[in-house]
Image: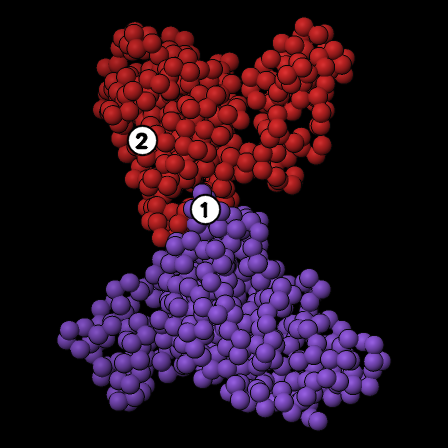
Chain colours: A purple, B red
Amino acid sequence: MDERAARMCLAAVIEPGHPVLADAVADFGAEGVWAGLLGADGDLPIAERARRLRPGELAARTKAERLRFLIPGDPDWPIRLADLAGCESVNGLSGEPLGLWAAGAGDLGALTAGAVAMVGSRASTAYGDSVAADLAAELSDAGRCVVSGGAYGIDAAAHRGCLAGRTPSLCVLAGGLDQPYPAGHRALFDRIAERGVILSELPPGEHPTRVRFLARNRLIAALAPGTVLVEAAARSGARNTVTWANVLSRVVMAVPGPVTSATSVTPHRLIRGAEAVLVTGAADVLELLSPLGRASPRAPGEHRATDELTPDELRVFESVPGRGSIPTGDLAARAGLTVPRSLALLDQLVERGFLAQTPLGEWQLPPRIARRGG
Amino acid sequence: MDERAARMCLAAVIEPGHPVLADAVADFGAEGVWAGLLGADGDLPIAERARRLRPGELAARTKAERLRFLIPGDPDWPIRLADLAGCESVNGLSGEPLGLWAAGAGDLGALTAGAVAMVGSRASTAYGDSVAADLAAELSDAGRCVVSGGAYGIDAAAHRGCLAGRTPSLCVLAGGLDQPYPAGHRALFDRIAERGVILSELPPGEHPTRVRFLARNRLIAALAPGTVLVEAAARSGARNTVTWANVLSRVVMAVPGPVTSATSVTPHRLIRGAEAVLVTGAADVLELLSPLGRASPRAPGEHRATDELTPDELRVFESVPGRGSIPTGDLAARAGLTVPRSLALLDQLVERGFLAQTPLGEWQLPPRIARRGG
């Protein structure tokens, strides 16, 4: 049995976020721990489960459900999950996952590189749903993948908004990927899987439990450099994801709402206590997650995610004057690129909202954009 | 001509917040400055105005309008206004007022002792009006006078909320008190004057101007230890009051709202930039303005403005047990006061909501109150 197979077997018999297991695997390797389990005292429930497991059947079922089983070190393994190794535990849970079952056509590594987690109440308001969907759509259009769970309310609104934009979303479930929960979201999960990715620490056939939701929350917080809380009542499961984000030193953001709304109590409390930064839209989120962070003074409409541009795209973008417009030839000369190459990049920049074309075919900044510091 | 008469004359001919005037009066006294003005070069417009002024007529008009003219040092002069002397200027304005025309039956000194300023947009939303009125009513019931301007929108909602509670409100106008502005608020101003106070730096007959509104804003910020901003669009006059509150090291608070609301842009921006603390209700405001500040853990309904109690009132209040009730005799013994004196104080404390009487005539904390730290 190889490392991957051993990790799959361990993930199938031991609850996610088990604090001792991660340490044991780090010390002895997955194969060693699996062999140890199989040879352990027969009275241990976990040893009993290990002996009952049929590794071949599990692998076959994973394949039959068209799932991949990813492990740390795989090229598309999200590197941020390593932060879970050795971090403080929450509710007695901790540790990097042994592996993840994954479905969907998306590139997990690429998606998580610029991900933003978004969580909130299941019992969201129309306001919360609308804000979550708008924010997710704007982030998606800015090239950011939105990571969330699969619940009703803010989770679903976040996925729907993200799917409406140009970047697919990433969904993390607390049960097996063949067991969509809630069942009413089966169609939503299918749509996410078309371009995005659905992940779970649990093997096919498993159902979510309370502790599995808590363990799942640590993955949502870990997968992104920042978590946005949209709506949450005084007592809300989303608060747990925020706790994980704080433990993992992620940027914690919260969207305010009417003070008369019970679902804005937790965002307001977090903002008031400086546990979260108030954000009102995608520009705020992108600024907080940009490498420059809060160092740059902010003005409405000033911010574009230029840090996502390739060097050539940035060269073209920076060659457009702050005021007025520039013909293609002059722009190509300024940028030091050929005209065809410049035109290809210009088309992309226009499509992504960084630039606009005048009726005479020249290039300019869109009306709403003033270049930062320019 | 005495100091008061000279200050009245100066206040009548020189625009409020004049930076040089306050210094001159501090150096030479009001009588000296007034005499100097009368003898100054005839080409100076201000000297011309001084010579045209009829001090006797101004005093008679002040009296005829049933106004008082207060000056620093008067027993009910708000001591916080002294912070305006020597503080940074805003829009070129600064300085403690030379005097204030006052109308209304309220005790200005007592009202400003526990005041909270509340400002916001003229073009407020139904949400903002409702939040401002509720917040003002709760503060009023907690013994806090709300200070605001006389404008439509949040100002009016704040006064109406405060008037619905047990403490009257304080209104500061930018024109003469006989010239209600806006005219549609004449009835509101009359109601405020029944139990509260209306103030102006301007003499009767004067109309508000842009600079007088700016000078007036410094008084609103200075009169209270904290200012709450309820709603304000990206560009709003209320922002100017917040600037004054910051310059005067007052506690600046802001109420969040829907991120989709244009009138919540400035509160959100202030909170995000840590220029204001997010508040969701009177409990938040009272906590921030309590002498202990944020040091004490907060629970809803926990806070009473006990810092406003006299030493004897506080002794009686503190003699009531945290749980259960106490007969009058035991309470008087604990407090070290006579029974009649205790009863007089108990009646006041009950009327002001600090204590309640049981059906058997014993004394207890009202159901909603838990004593801080007890």
Q: Quadrant of residue B39?
A: top left
Q: Secondary structure at mark 1?
A: loop
The chain letter under disc 2 is: B
Which amino acid type is marked by label 1? Ser
Q: Quadrant of residue A303?
A: bottom left
Let me know if residue A204 appears in the view.
Answer: yes
Q: At which x and y percent is residue B166?
A: 48, 21
User: Residue at (62%, 67%) from the top-left corner?
Assistant: A209
Q: At which x and y percent is residue A252?
A: 54, 60
The chain letter under disc 1 is: A
User: Residue at (69%, 67%) from the top-left corner?
Assistant: A93
Q: Secondary structure at mark 2?
A: loop
A314 or B145, which lies in front?
Answer: B145
Which amino acid type is marked by label 2? Ala
- The quarter of the image holding the N terminus of chain A is bottom right
A289 or B349, which lies in front?
Answer: B349
**A232 horizontally vs B344: left or right:** left
Let me know if residue B274 appears in the view.
Answer: no
Residue carrying label 1: A261
Residue B151 — which label? 2
> Which one is closest to the eye, mark 2 or mark 1?
1
Q: At which x and y percent is residue A282?
A: 41, 63
In the image, residue A133 above or below residue B45: below
Q: Residues within 10 Å of mark 2 (few under 14, many from 20)?
A: many
In the image, residue A97 above or below residue A55: above
